[in-house]
Amino acid sequence: MDARIALGLKFSEWLAMGHDPGGCPVRNLLDRLGDRWSMLLLCALAQGPKRFSVLARVIPDISKRMLSQTLRSLETDGLVLRDVQPTVPPSVTYSLTPLGESFASPLLGLVTWAEANFDVVRAARAQGRSDPGDLSQPSSQVS
Amino acid sequence: MDARIALGLKFSEWLAMGHDPGGCPVRNLLDRLGDRWSMLLLCALAQGPKRFSVLARVIPDISKRMLSQTLRSLETDGLVLRDVQPTVPPSVTYSLTPLGESFASPLLGLVTWAEANFDVVRAARAQGRSDPGDLSQPSSQVS
DNA sequence: TTGATAAGGTCTCATTTAGAGACCTATAAG
DNA sequence: CTTATAGGTCTCTAAATGAGACCTTATCAA
């Protein structure tokens, strides 16, 4: 796979450029999008615009607090558009901006990989638990 | 972009399947890989195998605790191989497994998007800050 | 006329998680 | 005798997260 090579080269570049943790685009965006909810919300909005309460329904285990907070963050970063209809009670619809839509492509890659490799990962996890042989070495005895 | 369509369809499938938050492969893997450090470490290891102290050096702002913890998690999930050389003091080398290497491809997509769109995101953030017209509503005054 | 419900949040509090930094093992160098 | 090194772990504190009460205004049911 030369994707690995390309990725390694990119990392080399960051190092060469001084690797300012705050200025690195990848670090910066990964910090934002790489939480538990952002990418999931973007998947949900990829279906089409949705209202706050609909999002809360299709993702049952997100709290209102985090839903609100994550949507604001995505809006601030220009990935999501928040449209408030001044009815009463107000009706708020969220949708992807063009920028948000452009993120669908890499996100789809991630999602596809996850679906394709989940079994392998689960097998690895299971093996880790059932093979305590290496852990019984006296040299790694803690305390 | 029909990546958006495809992503939306995937989300629809999850919903149709009952959307068990714990059983969803994407949720599960995103929870693991979607923290601040996992993907960054995978980028670093894409360059080639590295020792613990080297990783700590090329990513200056990770604490030893999180470095250790994240590497263990990646090892458990089968993405990273941990190789302990029984020298004294022991020398530990981390490398990508084939599974880890296969993740380089979607990760590269993410990284490429981040680099390409960072300016747009920053512009969106700046606009959010420099357009306080909507923020001056008394009801939304934050701290 | 109460009362409930609804949307779209915010607020407070308790629990998790992350970060900082001391500490530990054993050996070799100065 | 002191320091340094590799690869961590441990504790303590700070920050992020989740649970759930509360808010507003209007409409529907009893």
Image (cartoon, coloured by chain):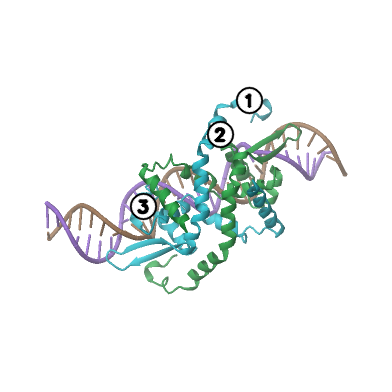
Chain colours: A cyan, B green, C brown, D purple
Q: Which residue is mark 1?
A: A136
Q: Which residue is mark 2?
A: A124
Query: Does the image show residue A30?
Result: yes
Q: Quadrant of the C terminus of chain A?
A: top right
1 or 2: tag closer to the N-terminus: 2
Residue A56 tag number: 3
- Relative to residue B98, is residue A129 depicted above or below? above
- The chain that hosts pointer 2 is A
Q: Crowdedness of circle 1 by 10 Å Cα count: few (<14), some, many (20+)?
A: few
- The chain that hosts pointer 3 is A
Is residue B112 shown left or right of residue A45? right
Q: CA distance from mark 1 to mark 2?
A: 20 Å
**Relative image position of residue A66 (x, y in whole percent):** 42, 53
Q: Crowdedness of circle 3 by 10 Å Cα count: few (<14), some, many (20+)?
A: some
**Relative image position of residue B92 (x, y in whole percent):** 70, 37
**Relative image position of residue B129 (x, y in whole percent):** 49, 70
Do badges 3 and 2 share one subunit? yes
